[in-house]
Amino acid sequence: MGDQKRKSWVNWLLFLATMVIVFLLGLLASSIMERRAEAVFAYEPVVDITMDYEPRNEIWGKNYPREYETYYQTSDTSFRTKYNGNVWIDMLEEDPRMVVLWAGYGFSKDYSQARGHAYAIEDIRNTLRTGGPMKPDEGPMPNTCWTCKSPDVPRVMQETGIAEFYNGKWASRGAQIHNPIGCADCHDPESMELRISRPALIEAFERQGKDISKVTHQEMRTLVCAQCHVEYYFNEESPAPGVPYLTFPWDKGTTPEEMLEYYNKMEFADWTHKISKAPMLKAQHPGYEIFKTSIHYERGVSCADCHMPYVSEGGVKYTNHWMTSPLRHVSTSCQVCHKESESTLFKNVFDKQDRVIEIRNKAEKELVKAHVEAGAAWKAGASETEMYSILQDIREAQWYWDYAAASHGASAHAPIETLRILGNSLNVAKEARVKLARLLASKGITEEIPYPDISTKAKAQAFIGLPMEKLLEQKREFLREIVPVWDAEAEAREETYPEYGE
């Protein structure tokens, strides 16, 4: 009798447990269906985007409001970390040595901390590097400089051809390049799949025998960034002779040593240094190349995983298009993998940056001295034969320094590789100075060449002979007279684009 009662109690318990499980499964199924319905509703197209390269982000925003709204948070420039962040910083004022290192090149006039993508058009218009003369068909920089600034670029490339787009002076395309970096730069309008819209990356892969169309989606979450965050140069020899064709110097590899070998073989130089007369290279922003040497890249982490992490809202999971420092949203970027506290993660990053900055500063001081001492050697009557080896050392040392300094986030992406590169810069710069000391001694100069007073940007620019007042007035005239014309022409053109109704 007792056994029967016990069995009956157990049966009722199993029945109740089964009912609870069924009830909970029902709730789970209902939640899943509801969230799917929310997702479908959230991404039901409001408009049909008919242009292959629709440059207006607000049109895309009608279909993808969450991504659109988070993208325009890139206009927020209030976040500052120990080193930079996304606030506006005059880097030449912060580090006047750079003025001397870039003497004779546009960066000695103006170099500011990069702001968010929403400012791409405004910032390239305002910088003194695209300064006078300022007639619409003139200007010192080529059209190639527009390449990474706007989704209008692939649109115009499609209309005119790639080489034709690169051809001509920067100011001649001003009315056509109007919308800031956005959706069409990375997405196909029909499928929303990630795609490469700039030819240089595709061409670089092809020269290496690789088909970029066969990479995974996770790889594309890095490669869409690698369209622009890379080292590049303007190749006027190939594939369109006489046209400054944007090219990635990856044919021998993507390390700074391999790229230097590439440049040396073709005897390429971006400019001749005003003081030392060395044939110089200007690194652009080899973020992708540095990132490839990192532990994150080795473990399959993409750029978007940290700089554009996934977020959930109302049952919808989407990519946050607020492209900014991971330190601004540690919980959704770093702490997805790293379980340390936020304060610990900040300290880990800043400790690495401190060490990189320490070596970088030493390399800069050695390079400034090398340029100034080379200038003294020329004045003392040194010949080109006597100076050749020295100038090649200066070129190499500054290339390594610039490669590390221009690679945004290098000290966080790959601190060990960055320190290695800066160590090479420091060593080669010292070797150049040893050779200069011997050469100067042979000319009767045994006293130390005085280090210039370049404690401020203004003093450094005066030291290299930059007529800053004239340059500033040219830029003011340009902004007053030509930019309003550009904007009016762009707005008139956009009125002829396809109509999109809700």
Image (cartoon, grey):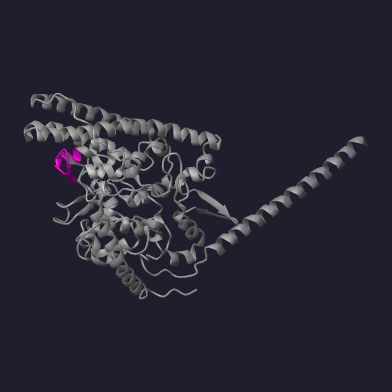
View extreme (right): residue: 1
Q: Is residue 414 visible?
A: yes
Residue 306 appears at what percent x and percent y? 46, 44
Residue 473 appears at what percent x and percent y? 26, 58
**39 relative to 210 in the view: left or right:** right
- Who's the residue at 49% across and 53% down the image? 319
Magenta region: 261-277
- Who's the residue at 37% across and 40% down the image? 291
Q: Can residue 162 be seen in this view?
A: no
Residue 245 appears at what percent x and percent y? 21, 54
Q: Please say if 110 is above or below 400.
A: below
In what quadrant of the picture does the N terminus appear? top right
- Of 18 and 125, the residue lying toward us: 125
Residue 330 appears at what percent x and percent y? 52, 42
Q: Please say if 449 is above or below 176.
A: above
- Of 197 and 115, the residue lying toward us: 115
Q: Please say if 60 is above or below 212.
A: below
- Of 252 and 387, the residue lying toward us: 387
Is residue 263 magenta-colored? yes
Total count of labels: 0
User: Quadrant of the rendered structure where residue 421 is?
Assistant: top left
User: Quadrant of the rendered structure where residue 447 is?
Assistant: top left
- Who's the residue at 25% across and 31% down the image? 366
**24 relative to 271 in the view: left or right:** right
Is residue 256 magenta-colored? no
